[in-house]
Image (tube, helix red, strand yellow):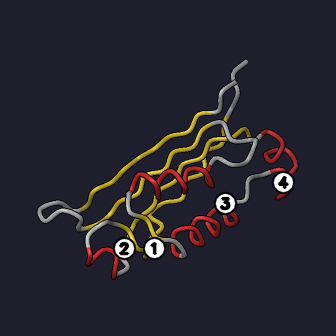
Amino acid sequence: MSRELAVIRIKNLRLRTFIGINVDEIANRQDVIINVEIQYPAEKARQTDNMEDALNYRTITKKIIDLVENNRFALLEKMTNDVLAIASEHHWIISASVEIDKPHALRFADSVSLQLTYTHKQ
């Protein structure tokens, strides 16, 4: 029997942080846009309608905000990895994906983004 998965998406979470290696980037906060997708089995939550049986996306989002706004990152890879660690930390999670955009990182591009994915090994 196939397992039905719930998908939580946190879309376009706009934060400001220190990200980069150039003098200007080290001295000034920049905008980042974070998208998170989390898959987990939600059979119990669908049956009980109790918060204890579901992943709390508000708690996850608050942890991401705290991480990003209260730290400095040289590399987009490190920030994305750290956000992915939060998005995938609960033992119910089957997979999680994080994409972080750094708007205006390149002169002729809307943004540069990096995406990392976690898959639970069974």
Q: Residue at x 60, y 46 (%)?
A: 38
Q: Which callout, 1 or 4, points at the residue further toward the start of the chain?
A: 1
**Pointer 3: what residue?**
57
State yes or no: discs 1 and 2 in contact (Cβ < 8 Å): yes
**Residue 85 drawn at (x, y percent):** 60, 50
- Residue at image mark 1: 15
Look at the numbered disc 2 and give the secondary structure of its residue.
strand
Residue type at numbered disc 4: Asp
- Mark 1 or 2 closer to N-term? 1
Q: Mark 4 — residue?
A: 49
- Image location (x, y in percent) of residue 77: 41, 51
Would you say 67 lies left or right of 24 here?
right
Name the amino acid, label 3: Tyr
Q: Secondary structure at mark 3?
A: helix
Residue 6: quadrant of the picture: top right
- Up the image or down, 18 lies above or below 113; here it is below
